[in-house]
Amino acid sequence: MWYILTSHATHDDTRRFFESKHFFGLQPEQVVMFRQRSMPATTPDGKIILESKSSVRVPSNSSSTILMRCH
């Protein structure tokens, strides 16, 4: 079984790529793709960073950002 973590932005392209390569010889049921959750970007003091006046910035590396904040 293969587990592949994708982002919201890359999930569909990744799935199409694997389909075009016939899952590299694996059965489609052997490949599980799942999207990484996203969290808003924050400053070191916990304030949410805006992308624009109407949208929150969401970094693509949410997990590593969280780990760095915990360190």
Image: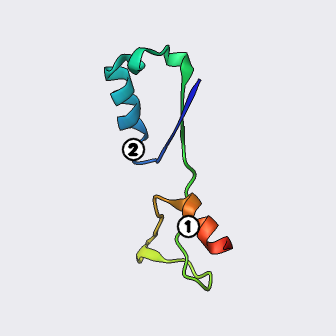
Image x and y of residue 2, in percent: 55, 28
Among the 4 quarters of the image, the one containing residue 52: bottom left
Instruction: Identify the residue at the far bottom of this view.
Output: 45
For residue 26, above or below residue 16:
above
Specify few, some or many for label 2: CA neighbours under 10 Å numbering under 14, 14-19, or 20 or more.
Answer: few
- Residue nearer the viewer, 39 or 29: 29
- At x 31% / y 21%, what residue is drawn? 20
Q: Kindly identify which numbered label has been placed on residue 32.
A: none
In the image, taking residue 69 as reference, residue 59 lies left or right, namely: left
- At x 39% / y 20%, what residue is drawn? 24
Query: Regarding mark 1 in the picture, which secondary structure is present there?
Result: helix
Quarter holding the C terminus is: bottom right
In the image, taking residue 6 as reference, residue 37 lies left or right, namely: right
- At x 49% / y 77%, what residue is drawn? 49
Specify few, some or many for label 1: CA neighbours under 10 Å numbering under 14, 14-19, or 20 or more.
Answer: some
- At x 47% / y 16%, what residue is drawn? 26
Image x and y of residue 12, in percent: 39, 36
Query: Regarding mark 2 in the picture, which secondary structure is present there?
Result: loop
The reply to whether residue 32 is in sight is yes
Which residue type carries mark 2?
Thr
Observer-side mark, 1 or 2, equals 1
Question: Which comes sooner in the sequence, label 1 or label 2?
Answer: 2
Q: Kindly identify which numbered label has been placed on residue 65.
A: 1
For residue 39, above or below residue 28:
below
Residue tagged by mark 2? 10
In the image, taking residue 3 as reference, residue 22 lies left or right, namely: left
Which residue type carries mark 1?
Thr
Image x and y of residue 29, in percent: 55, 17
The reply to whether residue 39 is in sight is no
